Amino acid sequence: MLKVENVTKYYDDFKAVDNLSFEVNKGEIFGLLGANGAGKTTTFRMIMNLLEPTSGKITLNGQVINYDITDKIGYLTEERSLLLKLTVKELMIYYASLKGMVKEDIENELKKWLKRFKIEEYENKKIKELSKGNKQKIQFISAIIHKPELLILDEPFSGLDPINVDMFIEVINELKENGTMIIFSSHQMNHVELFCEKLMILDHGKTILKGNLKDIKSNYDERKILVKADASKTELKKLKGVKNVLIKGDEIELSIEDKKYVESIFKYITKCKNVTKFEVVELSLHEIFTKEVGVRNEE
Ligand code: ATP
């Protein structure tokens, strides 16, 4: 288990991370989210032992993070940093040796992963000759080749086409099934919803939301109601609890302040003609993120 306990990080007198605590268990994908500058990279660097917390404690399977333990961690950084003049094989031998692997194992694992990602022919090609998506595959392989117990994925899908996104998703889910602890960070909330049961949102270093995605969504009182019926926008706007009405093609989307208004709105809709749809939906993570982070930055 990765345990981050009351971790604070100052850069001089600037507090970049403020009393952060979370846990990631084996076989769990944990979402660490936040707007630009929220403190995510600082947190990842402390987990990687590249930065020392000003206060607090980080442990992996009960051991305080140190240089030896970081061999058990894989980190796909947001910025893409490959050594362009090396070939794929040379690069992988360099990176994986730093993680304690021997040459023969590196070569075998590399072959396996290149085949899996359908880029076997690039083994002896220079990194600079690869397309953006293929460079991304190589960087991903370099983060997982040593079979890390903890894997940090910062924007793993940036620059990938939909087919490659699906390929990455399949591999990430397999790693999870095999017991890898995964921290997933992305500004693409739809990807986070796809993967993460547990998550936290940071803003200016502080935790503003934390918990199970399902609970976070159901505890949020606001709802959307999707309706297909002959109903007037003006009349719908007058209903109690309705904040906004949007017409989307043949569908009407009502934003309501609180789920307690669903019943009265339902009663109103049943009196309309040609009703073919009435669906109550929770806010998406994207909407919750925008509300939470937006509101705090206005305070
Ligand atoms: P992004 O999504 O943009 O990558 P982030 O959540 O990863 O952002 P961090 O890079 O951890 O955010 O930065 C958190 C805060 O700490 C920011 O205000 C940043 O300017 C500041 N910061 C980061 N590194 C340093 C440093 N070496 N010295 C001083 N301040 C820093």
Image (cartoon, rainbow, N blue to C red):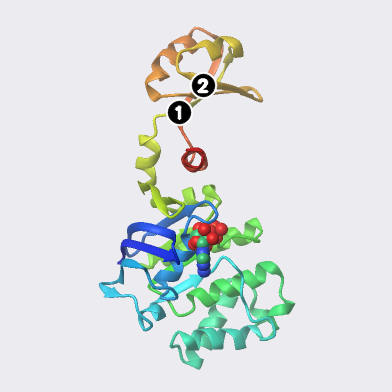
Mark 1 residue's CB less than 8 Å from ligand 1 = no
What x and y, as percent, mark residue 215?
A: 34, 41
* Residue designated by label 2: 243
Q: In this view, does 61 lie above or below 188?
A: below
* Residue designated by label 1: 223
Q: In the displayed image of the protein, which residue is found farthest to the top?
A: 271
The circle drawn on residue 80 is: none
Determine the secondary structure under disc 1: strand
What x and y, as percent, mark residue 223?
A: 45, 28
Inspect the image, locate mark 2, and give the three-letter code of the amino acid beneath it: Lys
Q: Nearer the viewer, residue 154 or 123?
A: 154
Few, some or many residues within 10 Å of mark 1 (<14, 14–19, 20+)? many
Q: In the displayed image of the protein, which residue is found farthest to the right?
A: 129
For image coordinates 37% across by 69% down, the residue present is 53
Residue 90 in sight: yes
Residue 170 in sight: no
Inspect the image, locate mark 1, and give the three-letter code of the amino acid beneath it: Arg
Q: Which of 13 and 253 is in front in this view?
A: 13
Few, some or many residues within 10 Å of mark 2 (<14, 14–19, 20+)? some
For image coordinates 44% across by 56% down, the residue present is 32
